[in-house]
Amino acid sequence: AQKITQTQPGMFVQEKEAVTLDCTYDTSDPSYGLFWYKQPSSGEMIFLIYQGSYDQQNATEGRYSLNFQKARKSANLVISASQLGDSAMYFCAMREGWGGGADGLTFGKGTHLIIQP
Amino acid sequence: DTGVSQDPRHKITKRGQNVTFRCDPISEHNRLYWYRQTLGQGPEFLTYFQNEAQLEKSRLLSDRFSAERPKGSFSTLEIQRTEQGDSAMYLCASSQETGADTQYFGPGTRLTVL
């Protein structure tokens, strides 16, 4: 089974609308972290937002917020007031475990977001 | 504060040749990661260093791949006897062993094996 599932290969959204990018995850580890990254056509992975499994509140960073529903194992990214510059690939990623034994991130296949004027 | 840097940005090589990539992490970060990303996929974890110690290696890291971080600062990733299937973007990331331990990525090295 895939550990990170992003079910939307591509999305078209009108500028200034809000966008929700879906992400579900699978882990039996009680300690984990969830990350969202943006990858423009230039290729660099840009960190957007982080949610820890024990965090009580949903994470927010400027126009980005993470809708964390632990029981459903979902961590959807919400972008408010989308801009043309938001057009990019968006990846959801998970790190299982915590502390001493660091783990590589497991990524989903990504969602290609295109903002239309 | 400069970000993660990688060199070269692009590499074209012939099958069977050896290639080496370099990654310079964010200066205060003690953890360094290598990932590989093929077209249309998310990055896949290859290996991880804490300071100079290589602590984890993915099954994706075949015997032809070797990574070093000799002084706990920059790292190199070498691929010996390259194959066409090695063509990919190789991404380096670094993190600090505190808080969320967020990984920050470099611009990547795009390898094309002819």
Image (spheres, coloured by chain):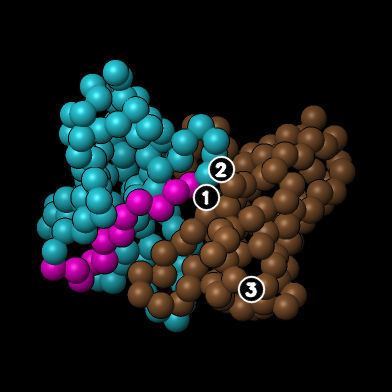
Chain colours: A cyan, B brown
Image check: A38 left or right of A116? right
Kind of residue indicated by mark 3 = Gln
Residue lying at 40% horizontally and 77% vertically, measured from the top left: B98
Q: Position of residue A10 (x, y in %)?
A: 33, 26
Is disc 3 surrounded by few (<14), some (14 to 19) or many (20+) residues within 10 Å?
some
Q: CA distance from mark 1 to mark 2?
A: 6 Å
* Element on which disc 2 rests: strand
Residue lying at 14% horizontally and 54% vertically, measured from the top left: A69
Q: Does the rendering let one see residue B22?
A: yes
Between B94 and B82, the one lying in front of the other is B94
Residue lying at 54% horizontally and 64% vertically, measured from the top left: B1
Kindly indicate whether the residue at mark 2 contacts the one at mark 1 (C-beta within 8 angstroms). yes
**What residue occupies the far top of the structure in this picture?**
A117
Q: CA distance from mark 3 to mark 2?
A: 21 Å
Between A7 and B63, the one lying in front of the other is A7
Please report, as a chain letter, where disc 3 is located.
Answer: B
Q: Position of residue B112 (x, y in %)?
A: 73, 34
Q: Which residues are magenta?
A: A45-56
Image check: A18 left or right of B98? left
Q: Which residue is mark 3?
A: B54
Kind of residue indicated by mark 2 = Gln
Between A46 and B42, the one lying in front of the other is A46
Is disc 1 surrounded by few (<14), some (14 to 19) or many (20+) residues within 10 Å?
many
Q: Which mark is residue B37?
A: 2
Give whichever of discs 3 and 2 has the lower sequence position. Answer: 2
Residue A61: within the magenta? no
